[in-house]
Amino acid sequence: MRPLTEDETKAVFEKLSRYVGQNLIQLVNRTDEPHFFRLHRERVFYVSEKQLKMAEHIPRKQLMSVGTIIGKFTKTRKFRVQITALDYLARFARYKVWLKAPGEQTFLYGNNVIRV
């Protein structure tokens, strides 16, 4: 598990800023406990400092996951956000949509959401 390089950090922050905009600063500079972005097996993790210190004692080959997966880099080095990042992105999202139960069911079946 290693810190992100400058190019990787730029790619991650550009992708996340599409969803959270200026609120990306709040995601990076947390007041309760410091969190870091770390890369392990082409996946970007959002890890608290406490978890990071505990994971340092585990060998890289045996380490499966630590923290929350934000996304992963493809073979062409593009960054893709994964569904596990939704909890953090929803908290700071620029645009939000509230659905009623029937609209939610429609969306889950793959149809478009009707605006009312």
Image (spheres, rainbow, N blue to C red):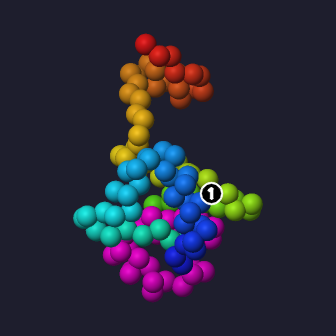
Q: Which of 75 and 67 is in front in this view?
A: 75
Which quarter shows the N terminus? bottom right
Magenta segment: 40-67
In the rendered image, residue 66 lying in the magenta stretch gets the answer: yes
- What residue is at 56 percent from the left and 63 percent from the top? 10
Which amino acid, by three-letter code, is at mark 1?
Answer: Phe
Residue 51 in sight in this render: yes
- What residue is at 59 percent from the left and 67 percent from the top? 8
Residue count near mark 1 (Cα–Cα under 10 Å), binned few <14, some 14–19, many ≥20: many
In the rendered image, residue 95 lying in the magenta stretch gets the answer: no
Q: What element carries label 1?
A: strand
- What residue is at 31 percent from the left and 63 percent from the top? 30
Residue 106 in picture, x, y percent from top left? 52, 21
Can you say whether 104 is above or below 116 in the image?
A: below
Q: Which of 110 and 81 is in front in this view?
A: 81
Can you say whether 108 is above or below 61 in the image?
A: above
Residue 26 in picture, x, y percent from top left? 34, 57
Residue 24 in picture, x, y percent from top left? 41, 54
> Which residue is label 1 attached to?
79
Q: Quadrant of residue 71?
A: bottom right
